[in-house]
Structure formats: structure tokens, C-alpha cells
Image (cartoon, rainbow, N blue to C red):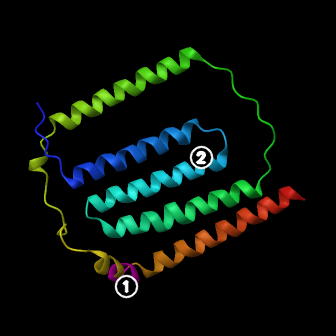
Amino acid sequence: MFNVEITGEFVAFFILAVILIGGVVLMISLEKVVHMVLSMAAVFVGLAGMYVLLEAEFVAFVQVLIYAGAVSVLMIFGIMMTKHGDHQKEPARPAHELLSAIGALCLFGLLFYAIRTTDLSSAGTTAFDPGNDQTMEIGKQLFTSYVIPFELVSILLTVAFIGAIAIAKKEEE
């Protein structure tokens, strides 16, 4: 039925898929927030590995640098700077869980059907050659044509971070 050749790329894909799915399942099932952030960081690293398999090295690098590094550290800081009281666990709702499981299975079936019936060979050509490294071209565009938006985003993120610290300090006092 399936004619699949076992290659190193195929094995790497399934290892990364296990890391991604395991990290997501741990993210939603763990109770301690720090453990949730660590499992989310594992998901980000697994996603970066998927980008490497797709020959998008720059996007993989940015994924590790920004998401696995900066966002995870920022979330840890946010956890450390806020107060956490004793939270009561919500009562189990079996009907809600059953409906969620049925909805997830229906979504999986719909996506599986769509992927299996789609003819991917007739997809349009891309604007770049996937065999070449596009990092230099992205850097040129970022620092010539898009330098103003790039700097504005960095200023916005700095202001947001300072504002978060100010709000956390105000709650503390």
C-alpha cells in the first residue's frame, strides 16, 4: 500500500516527530509551569530540526535563537516575577473530554483525507531555489529594504519587556 524507502531523512523525520508530539503532550499535561516551558522549548528545537530537513537553515537558526532561547527565557522570567497562589484543580468533565477527543479525531481524519487526496506535484514553483542557502539574501533584504521595520520591532519588544517588568514590580509593592 505504502511504498516508503527508509532513509536517514525518513528516520530523522520520525525522531523529530516523536520529540514534537511528546513535547506537546507534556506541555498540555504537566502541572508545573516551569516543566511546561521546558517541554515547549523541546517542541521549538524539534521544529527547528524539521526546518533543517526542509533545507530552511536560516529559519531553523531563528527558531532556535528566538523561540527556544529568547521566548523560553522570557517565559521563565515571567513565571519567576509573578506570584503563584494555590490553585484548585478543576473537576473532571468526562463529557467534555469525550467531545474533545471526538473533535480531535474528526480533525485528524479530515486532514489525513486532504493530504492523501491532494496532488502535490502540480504545486507552483517557488521564488527561490531550495538547494541554495538563502541566508545572505535574507540578511541583505533585512538590513537594506526592511531596516526601519526591523528597528521598530526591536524598540517595541524592548518597551514591552520594560513595561512587563514595571507591572510586575508594581504588583510586588
Counting residues from the N terminus, which is met first, the one under dot 1 or under dot 2? Answer: 2
Mark 1 closeness class: few <14, some 14–19, many ≥20 residues within 10 Å: few
Where 104 falls versus 79 (above or below)?
above
Binning the other alpha carbons within 10 Å of mark 2 as few (below 14), some (14 to 19) or many (20 upward) gives some
Check if residue 143 falls in the magenta segment.
yes
Foreground residue among 148 and 76: 76
Residue 24 shows which numbered tag?
A: none
Tell me the quarter of the image containing the C terminus. bottom right
Q: Residue at x 41, y 24 (%)?
A: 103
Label 1 with label 2: CB-CB less than 8 Å: no
Residue 67, horizontal then vertical, whole percent: 50, 61
Q: Is residue 172 magenta?
A: no
* x 59%, y 51%: residue: 37
38 or 56, which is in the foreground? Answer: 38
Residue under pointer 1: 144
Residue type, label 2? Met
- On residue 36, which mark appears? 2
Q: Give the structural element (helix, strand or loop) at label 2.
A: helix
Q: Main secondary structure of the magenta part?
A: helix
| Residue 85 image point, x, y percent | 81, 41
Q: Quadrant of the N terminus?
A: top left
Of circles 1 and 2, the one toward us is 2
Residues shaded magenta: 140-145
Question: Could you tell me the amino acid type at mark 1?
Answer: Thr
